[in-house]
Image: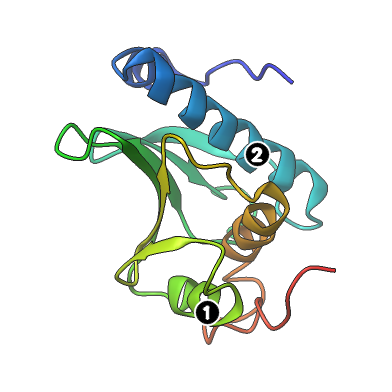
Amino acid sequence: MSIPFQSSAVAQAFEAYPPAMRRQLMALRELIFRTAASTPGVGELEETLKWGEPAYLTTRSKSGSTIRIAWKKTRPTEYAMYFNCQTTLVDTFRSLFPDDFQFEGNRALVFQDSQAVPTDTLAFCVAAALTYHRNGKDGAPVTRKPS
C-alpha cells in the first residue's frame, strides 16, 4: 500500500530521516493509515507536522487523539510512536502489553531499529488512539487484548 503524502512538508520530514529509519517510520505510517481505514468511525486522516514530526489526526470525525511518529538524532537506534501525554492511552497499553513494547513515560512506544514490531498489537493501540474521543476520555476504548 503506497499512500501519497498529503503535503510536501511531511514528505520532506520523512526524507530527512536516515534511510533505515525512514523505512521503519514508513511502515508505521502505513500501519496507521491501514488501521484508520479498517476502524469504523475514524474516517479520513489528516497528515501534518506537529513539532516538526509526522502527525496523524482525525480532524473530520474528531474520533481520536493525535498520533506522531519520529526518530531523534539523540537516540540513533530508536524510533517511536507518540501519543498525547494527557490521555490514558500509554498507561493502558503498558497494563495490557507489558512485554510487547518499550515505553517512554506516558507518551510513547519506543522501538529499536533491530526489533520486530508486533504489528497486530500495535494496530490495536493505533485503533484505540484513533477512537479515543469517540469512546470516552477515560480510557474506555482499550479494555481488552486483541484476539
Horizontal side of 12 relative to 60 (left or right) equals: left
- Mark 2, Cα crowd under 10 Å, few <14 / some 14-19 / many 20+, is some
Where's residue 71, x and y in %?
31, 35
Using the image, determine if residue 130 lies above or below residue 46: below
Residue 63 visible to an observer of this rendering: no
| Element carrying mark 1 | helix
Name the image quarter holding residue 102.
bottom left
Quadrant containing the N terminus in the rendered view: top right
Residue drawn at the location 53% of the way across and 18% of the way down: 5
Q: Which residue is mark 2?
A: 31
Image vertical order of residue 69 relative to residue 19, above or below: below
Q: Residue at x 61, y 55 (%)?
A: 126
Left or right? Give the position of 129 relative to 68: right
In this orientation, which residue lies closer to the viewer: 27 or 111?
111
Amino acid of disc 1: Thr
**Position in image of residue 136 (x %, y %):** 60, 81
Amino acid identity at mark 2? Leu
**Front residue (pair 136, 82):** 82
**Circle 1 residues within 10 Å: few <14, some 14–19, many ≥20:** many
Camera-side residue of 16 and 114? 114
Above or below: residue 7 compared with residue 123? above
Q: Residue furthest front?
A: 114
The answer to whether one can see residue 28 in this image is yes
Asked if 16 appears above or below 126 in the picture, the reply is above
Q: Quadrant of residue 76?
A: top left
Residue at x 81%, y 47% (from the top left corner):
38
Q: Which mark is residue 92?
A: 1
Whole-number angstrom distance, CA of label 1 to CA of label 2: 20 Å
Task: For the C terminus, give its image quadrant.
Answer: bottom right
Whether pointer 1 and pointer 2 mark residues with C-beta atoms closer than 8 Å, the reply is no
- Number of callouts in the render? 2
